[in-house]
Amino acid sequence: MENKIKVSLALLLLICLINMPYGYYQLVRFLAMIGFGILAYRTCSKGHLNVAIIYTALAVLFQPIIKIAFSRYLWNMIDVLVAIGLILSIYRKTKNLPR
């Protein structure tokens, strides 16, 4: 389930690079907050506190209640970096699994 959340969030964030209606960006912020919150809870319950802190910080960054005002260029950079990080975390996790 975690991989599905990561892939979904990565896709949503990469679609933000396209010029979309403002409502889409609000939806992405809301879904990202929920998704990163779930990921933070699951990683914290597994004992990975450092990763849980990163997911919590991302949930706060993307939360739609108190908006953090960055330029579109900076938001695009954040979206791409977070999407790449999510995809790499899937690869890293599957690479380290015992066979």
Image: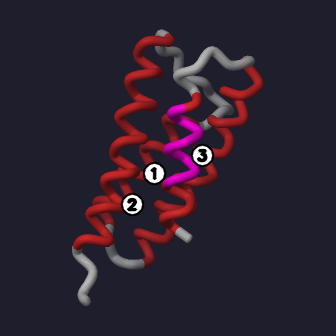
Residue 16, image x, y percentages: 57, 26
- Along the viewing direction, whichever of 72 and 46 lies nearer the viewer: 72
Give the CA distance from mark 3 to mark 2. 13 Å
Q: Amino acid at mark 3?
A: Met
Q: Are marks 3 and 1 in contact (CB under 8 Å)?
A: no
Pointer 1 residue = 56
Q: Residue 33: which disc? A: 3
Res 15 quadrant in image: top right
Q: In the rendered image of this protein, does residue 14 appear above or below residue 76?
A: below
The quarter of the image holding the C terminus is bottom left
Pointer 2 residue = 52
Q: Is residue 78 left or right of residue 61?
A: left
Q: Is disc 2 placed on a helix, strand or loop?
A: helix
Disc 1 packing (10 Å; few <14; some 14–19; many ≥20):
some
Q: What range of the chain is rendered magenta?
A: 7-14
Q: Residue 85: which disc? A: none
Instruction: Please tell me which of labels 3 and 1 falls first in the chain.
Output: 3
